[in-house]
Image (tube, helix red, strand yellow):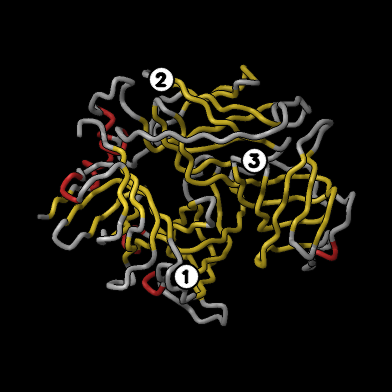
């Protein structure tokens, strides 16, 4: 039997999903006189602490949740509220290890976060429940720092942020890290020197003070506050939804949502032009895009370089809300922020808590991982499937 849920109805059930996750970070808040910024978008929140069914929130047009109060615990004057699309922006003199506080009508939860002084931290696709906070991706922009340790052989460096007592971050270099010298010319790790100042853009692991650097500019100057930021991206394609123009990439820490525009250029490393439909699960995707601070849920891709990698057995992570269940074929459709992902149950799939396909319900939130299906290159065979009941199920 096949059950299908239309996307509009699914938005309401998304709000009812519950999950619990939080990280930790070392360091302490510090006032530097330099403005730091945290932006984000809340896409789902349970409707009541008692687990009641979602009500008028089901009418949200794009999965965003308005009316959530957001603040920085260590800087009480820094407060904001989510707009009708779930977006918020906090700006003030705070840095180091802080706690973002999210307050709804039903509950208050916190998310630990380390914010380098003067930088922009963008949290993408935030889900809230009485149990905690879940963030799909965290982007670090305009991190101006002084290099304190460099090891080009291992691709690991350390950098201290602005201000006295600033946190030291571990910076990971990858093959795709773009290094630019102060004169604008292309550089390399050998151009970096202890004591020099740089500006770093990349992805942040909120559970650690670790940044995967995708762009390093020597001679970094104090950042401005351009509401439209250029941002590199890198990851493995784990969801491709060409009708909605959405591609999701995963770097094993963050799941980044890319929005394809009519002007987006997609190509192979040799320059051959591609279409969205040429992108396959498991392909490596690297490129440059635009992040709008007022709506930071997705990066608008300008250029994407797609490399096809044949990696049998490599597991891809998935997440979403069940929008279709076919127990005859074992195929599940997951809907998450404009993208549909197809996952196949196999006899080897481990479901937690222990459930059968017939026990699954439309709107349940699921996540897990598995290899690309041997039966279809557009599906993932679920090795593990974690299920959280939607309210009312």
Side of 130 relative to 114 (left or right): left
Position of 217 compared to 210: left or right?
A: right
Q: Label 2 crowding class (10 Å Cα cut-off): few <14, some 14-19, many 20+?
A: some
Please name which of the two marks, 3 or 1, marks the residue nearer to the observer.
1
Marks 2 and 3 sit apart, C-alpha to C-alpha, by: 27 Å
Label 3, label 1: how far apart the Cα atoms are: 29 Å
Tell which circle, 3 or 1, labels the residue nearer the N-terminal end.
3
The residue identified by callout 1 is 283
Image coordinates for residue 226, horizontal then vertical, percent: 64, 44
Pointer 1: residues within 10 angstroms few (<14), some, or many (20+)?
many
| Nearest the eye: 21 or 349 | 349
Mark identifier at residue 120: 3
Q: Secondary structure at mark 2?
A: loop
Q: Residues within 10 Å of mark 3 (few under 14, many from 20)?
A: many
Vertical arrangement, residue 194 with respect to residue 46, above or below: below
**Residue visible at 14% across and 50% down in the picture:** 3
Q: Quadrant of residue 315?
A: bottom left
Question: Which residue occupies 54% across, 71% down?
Answer: 305
Instruction: Check the picture and name the quadrant holding the C terminus.
Output: top left
Residue to which mark 2 is pinned: 107
Q: Is residue 389 above or below residue 358?
A: above
Q: Residue at x 68, y 55 (%)?
A: 213
Residue 91 falls in image quadrant: top right
Q: Kindly check if marks 3 and 1 are in contact, taking CB atoms under 8 A apart as contact.
A: no
**SS at mark 3?**
strand
């Amino acid at each position: 039997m096949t059950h299908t849920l239309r996307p509009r109805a699914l938005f309401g059930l998304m709000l009812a999903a519950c999950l619990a996750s939080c990280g930790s970070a070392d360091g302490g808040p510090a006032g530097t006189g330099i403005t730091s910024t945290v932006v984000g978008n809340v896409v789902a929140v349970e409707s009541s602490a008692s687990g009641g069914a979602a009500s008028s929130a089901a009418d949200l047009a794009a999965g965003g949740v308005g009316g959530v109060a957001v603040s920085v615990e260590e800087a009480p004057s820094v407060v904001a509220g989510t707009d009708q699309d779930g977006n918020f922006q906090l700006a003030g003199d705070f840095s180091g290890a802080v706690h973002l506080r999210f307050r709804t009508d039903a509950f208050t939860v916190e998310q630990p976060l380390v914010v380098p002084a003067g930088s922009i931290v963008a949290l993408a696709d935030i889900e809230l429940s009485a149990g905690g906070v879940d963030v799909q991706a965290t982007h670090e922009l305009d991190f101006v720092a002084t290099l304190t340790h460099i090891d080009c052989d291992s691709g690991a460096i350390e950098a201290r942020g602005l201000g006295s007592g600033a946190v030291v971050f571990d910076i990971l270099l990858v093959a795709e890290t773009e290094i630019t010298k102060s004169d604008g010319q292309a550089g390399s790790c050998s151009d970096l020197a202890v004591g020099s100042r740089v500006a770093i853009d990349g992805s942040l692991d909120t559970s650690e003070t670790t940044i995967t650097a995708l762009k390093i500019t020597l001679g970094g100057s104090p950042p401005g506050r351009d509401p439209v930021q250029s941002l590199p991206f890198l990851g493995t394609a784990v969801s491709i939804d060409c009708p909605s123009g959405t591609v999701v990439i995963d770097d094993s820490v963050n799941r980044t949502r890319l929005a394809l525009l009519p002007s987006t250029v997609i190509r192979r490393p040799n320059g051959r032009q591609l279409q969205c439909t040429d992108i396959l699960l498991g392909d490596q995707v690297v490129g440059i895009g635009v992040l709008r601070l007022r709506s930071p849920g997705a990066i608008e891709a300008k250029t994407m370089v797609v490399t096809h990698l044949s990696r049998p057995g490599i597991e891809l992570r998935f997440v979403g809300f069940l929008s279709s269940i076919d127990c005859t074929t074992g195929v599940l459709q997951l809907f998450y922020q404009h993208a549909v992902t197809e996952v196949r149950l196999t006899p080897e799939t481990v479901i937690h808590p222990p459930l059968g396909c017939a026990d699954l319900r439309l709107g349940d939130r699921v996540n897990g991982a598995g290899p690309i299906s041997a039966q279809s290159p557009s599906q993932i065979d679920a090795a593990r499937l974690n299920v959280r009941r939607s309210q009312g199920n």
